[in-house]
């Protein structure tokens, strides 16, 4: 296929950049709404808020809108719970034509009362969808009334789908969480304590991370939102530090908690040996009056790398020289993936994200090799063009990118929130390398047209 014939859509030029020696030093355009017709891989505002709050497992989640919004986000993350599983049930008020004409507040009220009586949750989240923004239901008033009657927090989530990008949904979710934080007792919280923010317990990843910190002697007050519990969130203002992984979704909350409760925050990543080790050291460093925390961090890093590093050499031997394309939700994850891929001998030829900001893209430009294409808010046609042009052997993305990779005849690794295998932590790096190895080296690709196989 002559990929040169695939041109960028007019209006997208400034969101695509190729790093070239002596090339122009321009900033990548980002933080803007998607271009009409570009089939952006981004989701809507409502979906952004839904994915952030989804793992809170002892709350009910009610999507106030037509059934399609709920169906679109039903059981959307691979977030697991160690206890209740209310999060896996997605309730909808299923608004119909008459509700749109006469308003949906009464229906929302009835749904809330019935569901709270039936499931006895510790809280409820009510999500606004596009149509609610249009008809103007006062969900705040309904939430307030039901909270008073039932004695549990009922949180409105202002996430009308059309009012911005997925990032605005993250903010709406953080605003709802912020209303819960500060309403619980901080009794029994140690000085050596943290909240883990932006970790969603996909395939049990939060449990892996939590165990490392607890082994170091640090108390984890709340995980937001993986394996999340309402009571933990309510008392999370008692922690000494916020450790933020998915910075795109949770930096807003960390900043708000810093402003209101004086809790400092750091940004970390749990992907790859290098960043995982740094996440432990960075936290330990902030508790200098207890040196044994750092000693324990060093011991964990030493033991874990000793356990997994030799195994990974087999994968590295096979993968050295192979090329990867990365297109994920947040840019911070891209940084870790570039480092993790280098650990197993692979280079990155395409790096992009749905929600990166100007600082993220500047850092990406510094990290990437010459010839790497960097994209913001890309689409399937662009991704296909660059995967083929750059002769990538692997595409790392989410569920929407999987068919692109398979149709092009390249390996695929799911690094999005649907994944079923933990990729965080030291053990996660091992699983990541194994998955990449198995996909890239699969004999099936010899039959793909790209490799001159079956047409
Ligand atoms: S909130 Fe709006 S954009 Fe999002 S799924 Fe519902 S109708 Fe679609």
Image (cartoon, helix red, strand yellow):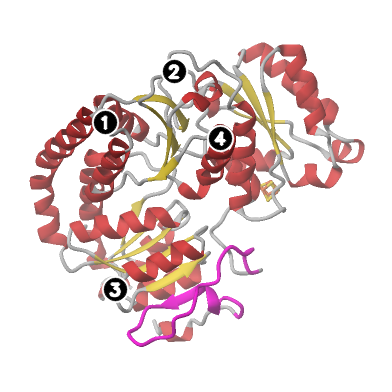
Residue 379 position, x and y percent, is: 52, 66
Query: In the rendered structure, which segment of residues is drawn in magenta?
Result: 10-35
Residue 107 position, x and y percent, is: 81, 27
**Residue 369 numbered tag:** 3
Q: Which residue is mark 1?
A: 212
Kindly indicate whether the residue at mark 1 contacts the one at mark 4 (C-beta within 8 angstroms): no
Kindly indicate whether the residue at mark 3 contacts the one at mark 1 (C-beta within 8 angstroms): no
Would residue 346 be visible to someone looking at this image?
yes
Q: Label 2 to label 3, Cα distance in Å? A: 45 Å
Residue at x-position 71% and y-position 40%: 158
Q: Label 1 to label 3, Cα distance in Å? A: 33 Å
Q: Which residue is mark 4?
A: 53
Q: Secondary structure at mark 3?
A: loop
Residue at x-position 36% and y-position 46%: 268
Which of the two discs, 1 and 3, labels the residue nearer the N terminus? 1
Q: Nearer the viewer, residue 183 or 305?
A: 183
- The answer to whether residue 11 is magenta is yes
Residue at x-position 59% and y-position 17%: 122
Residue at x-position 33% and y-position 73%: 455
Q: Which residue is mark 2?
A: 83
Query: Which is in the foreground here, disc 2 or disc 3?
Result: 3
Q: Label 4 to label 2, Cα distance in Å? A: 16 Å
- The answer to whether residue 381 is magenta is no
Judged left or right of residue 160, residue 399 is: left
Name the main secondary structure of what is drawn in magenta.
loop
């Amino acid at each position: 296929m002559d990929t040169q014939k695939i041109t960028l859509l007019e209006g997208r030029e400034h969101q695509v950049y190729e790093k070239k020696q002596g090339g122009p030093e321009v900033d990548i355009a980002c933080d803007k709404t998607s271009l009409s017709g570009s089939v952006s891989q981004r989701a809507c505002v409502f979906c952004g808020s839904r994915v952030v709050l989804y793992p809170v497992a002892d709350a009910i989640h009610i999507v106030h809108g037509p059934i399609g919004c709920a169906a679109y986000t039903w059981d959307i993350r691979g977030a697991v719970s160690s206890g209740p599983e209310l999060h896996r049930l997605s309730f909808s008020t299923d608004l119909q034509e008459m509700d749109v004409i006469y308003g949906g507040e009464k229906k929302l009220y009835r749904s809330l009362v019935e569901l709270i009586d039936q499931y006895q949750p510790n809280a409820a989240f009510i999500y606004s969808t596009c149509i609610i923004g249009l008809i103007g239901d006062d969900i705040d008033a309904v939430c307030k009334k039901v909270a008073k009657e039932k004695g549990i927090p009922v949180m409105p989530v202002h996430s009308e789908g059309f009012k911005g990008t997925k990032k605005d949904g993250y903010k709406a979710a953080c605003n709802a969480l912020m209303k819960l934080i500060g309403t619980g007792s901080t009794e029994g919280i140690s000085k050596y304590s943290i909240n883990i923010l932006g970790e969603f317990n996909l395939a049990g990843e939060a449990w892996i991370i939590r165990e490392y910190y607890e082994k170091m002697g640090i108390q984890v007050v709340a995980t937001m939102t993986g394996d999340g519990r309402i009571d933990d969130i309510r008392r999370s203002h008692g922690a000494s530090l916020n450790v933020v992984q998915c910075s795109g979704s949770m930096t807003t909350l960390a900043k708000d908690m810093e402003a209101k409760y004086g809790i400092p925050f750091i940004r970390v990543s749990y992907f790859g040996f290098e960043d995982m080790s740094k996440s432990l050291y960075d936290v330990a460093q902030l508790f200098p009056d207890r040196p044994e925390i750092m000693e324990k961090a060093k011991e964990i890093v030493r033991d874990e790398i000793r356990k997994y590093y030799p195994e990974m050499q087999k994968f590295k031997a096979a993968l050295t020289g192979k090329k990867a394309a990365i297109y994920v939700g947040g840019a911070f994850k891209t940084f870790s993936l570039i480092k993790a891929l280098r650990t197993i001998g692979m280079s990155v030829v395409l790096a992009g994200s749905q929600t990166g900001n100007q600082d993220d893209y500047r850092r990406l430009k510094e990290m990437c090799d010459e010839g790497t294409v960097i994209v913001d808010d890309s689409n399937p046609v662009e991704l296909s063009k660059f995967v083929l042009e750059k002769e990538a052997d692997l595409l790392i993305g989410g569920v929407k990118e999987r068919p692109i990779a398979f149709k092009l005849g390249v390996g695929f690794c799911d690094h999005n929130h649907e994944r079923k295998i933990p990729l965080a932590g030291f053990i996660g790096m091992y699983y990541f390398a194994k998955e990449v190895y198995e996909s890239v080296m699969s004999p099936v690709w010899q039959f793909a047209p790209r490799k001159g196989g079956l047409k």
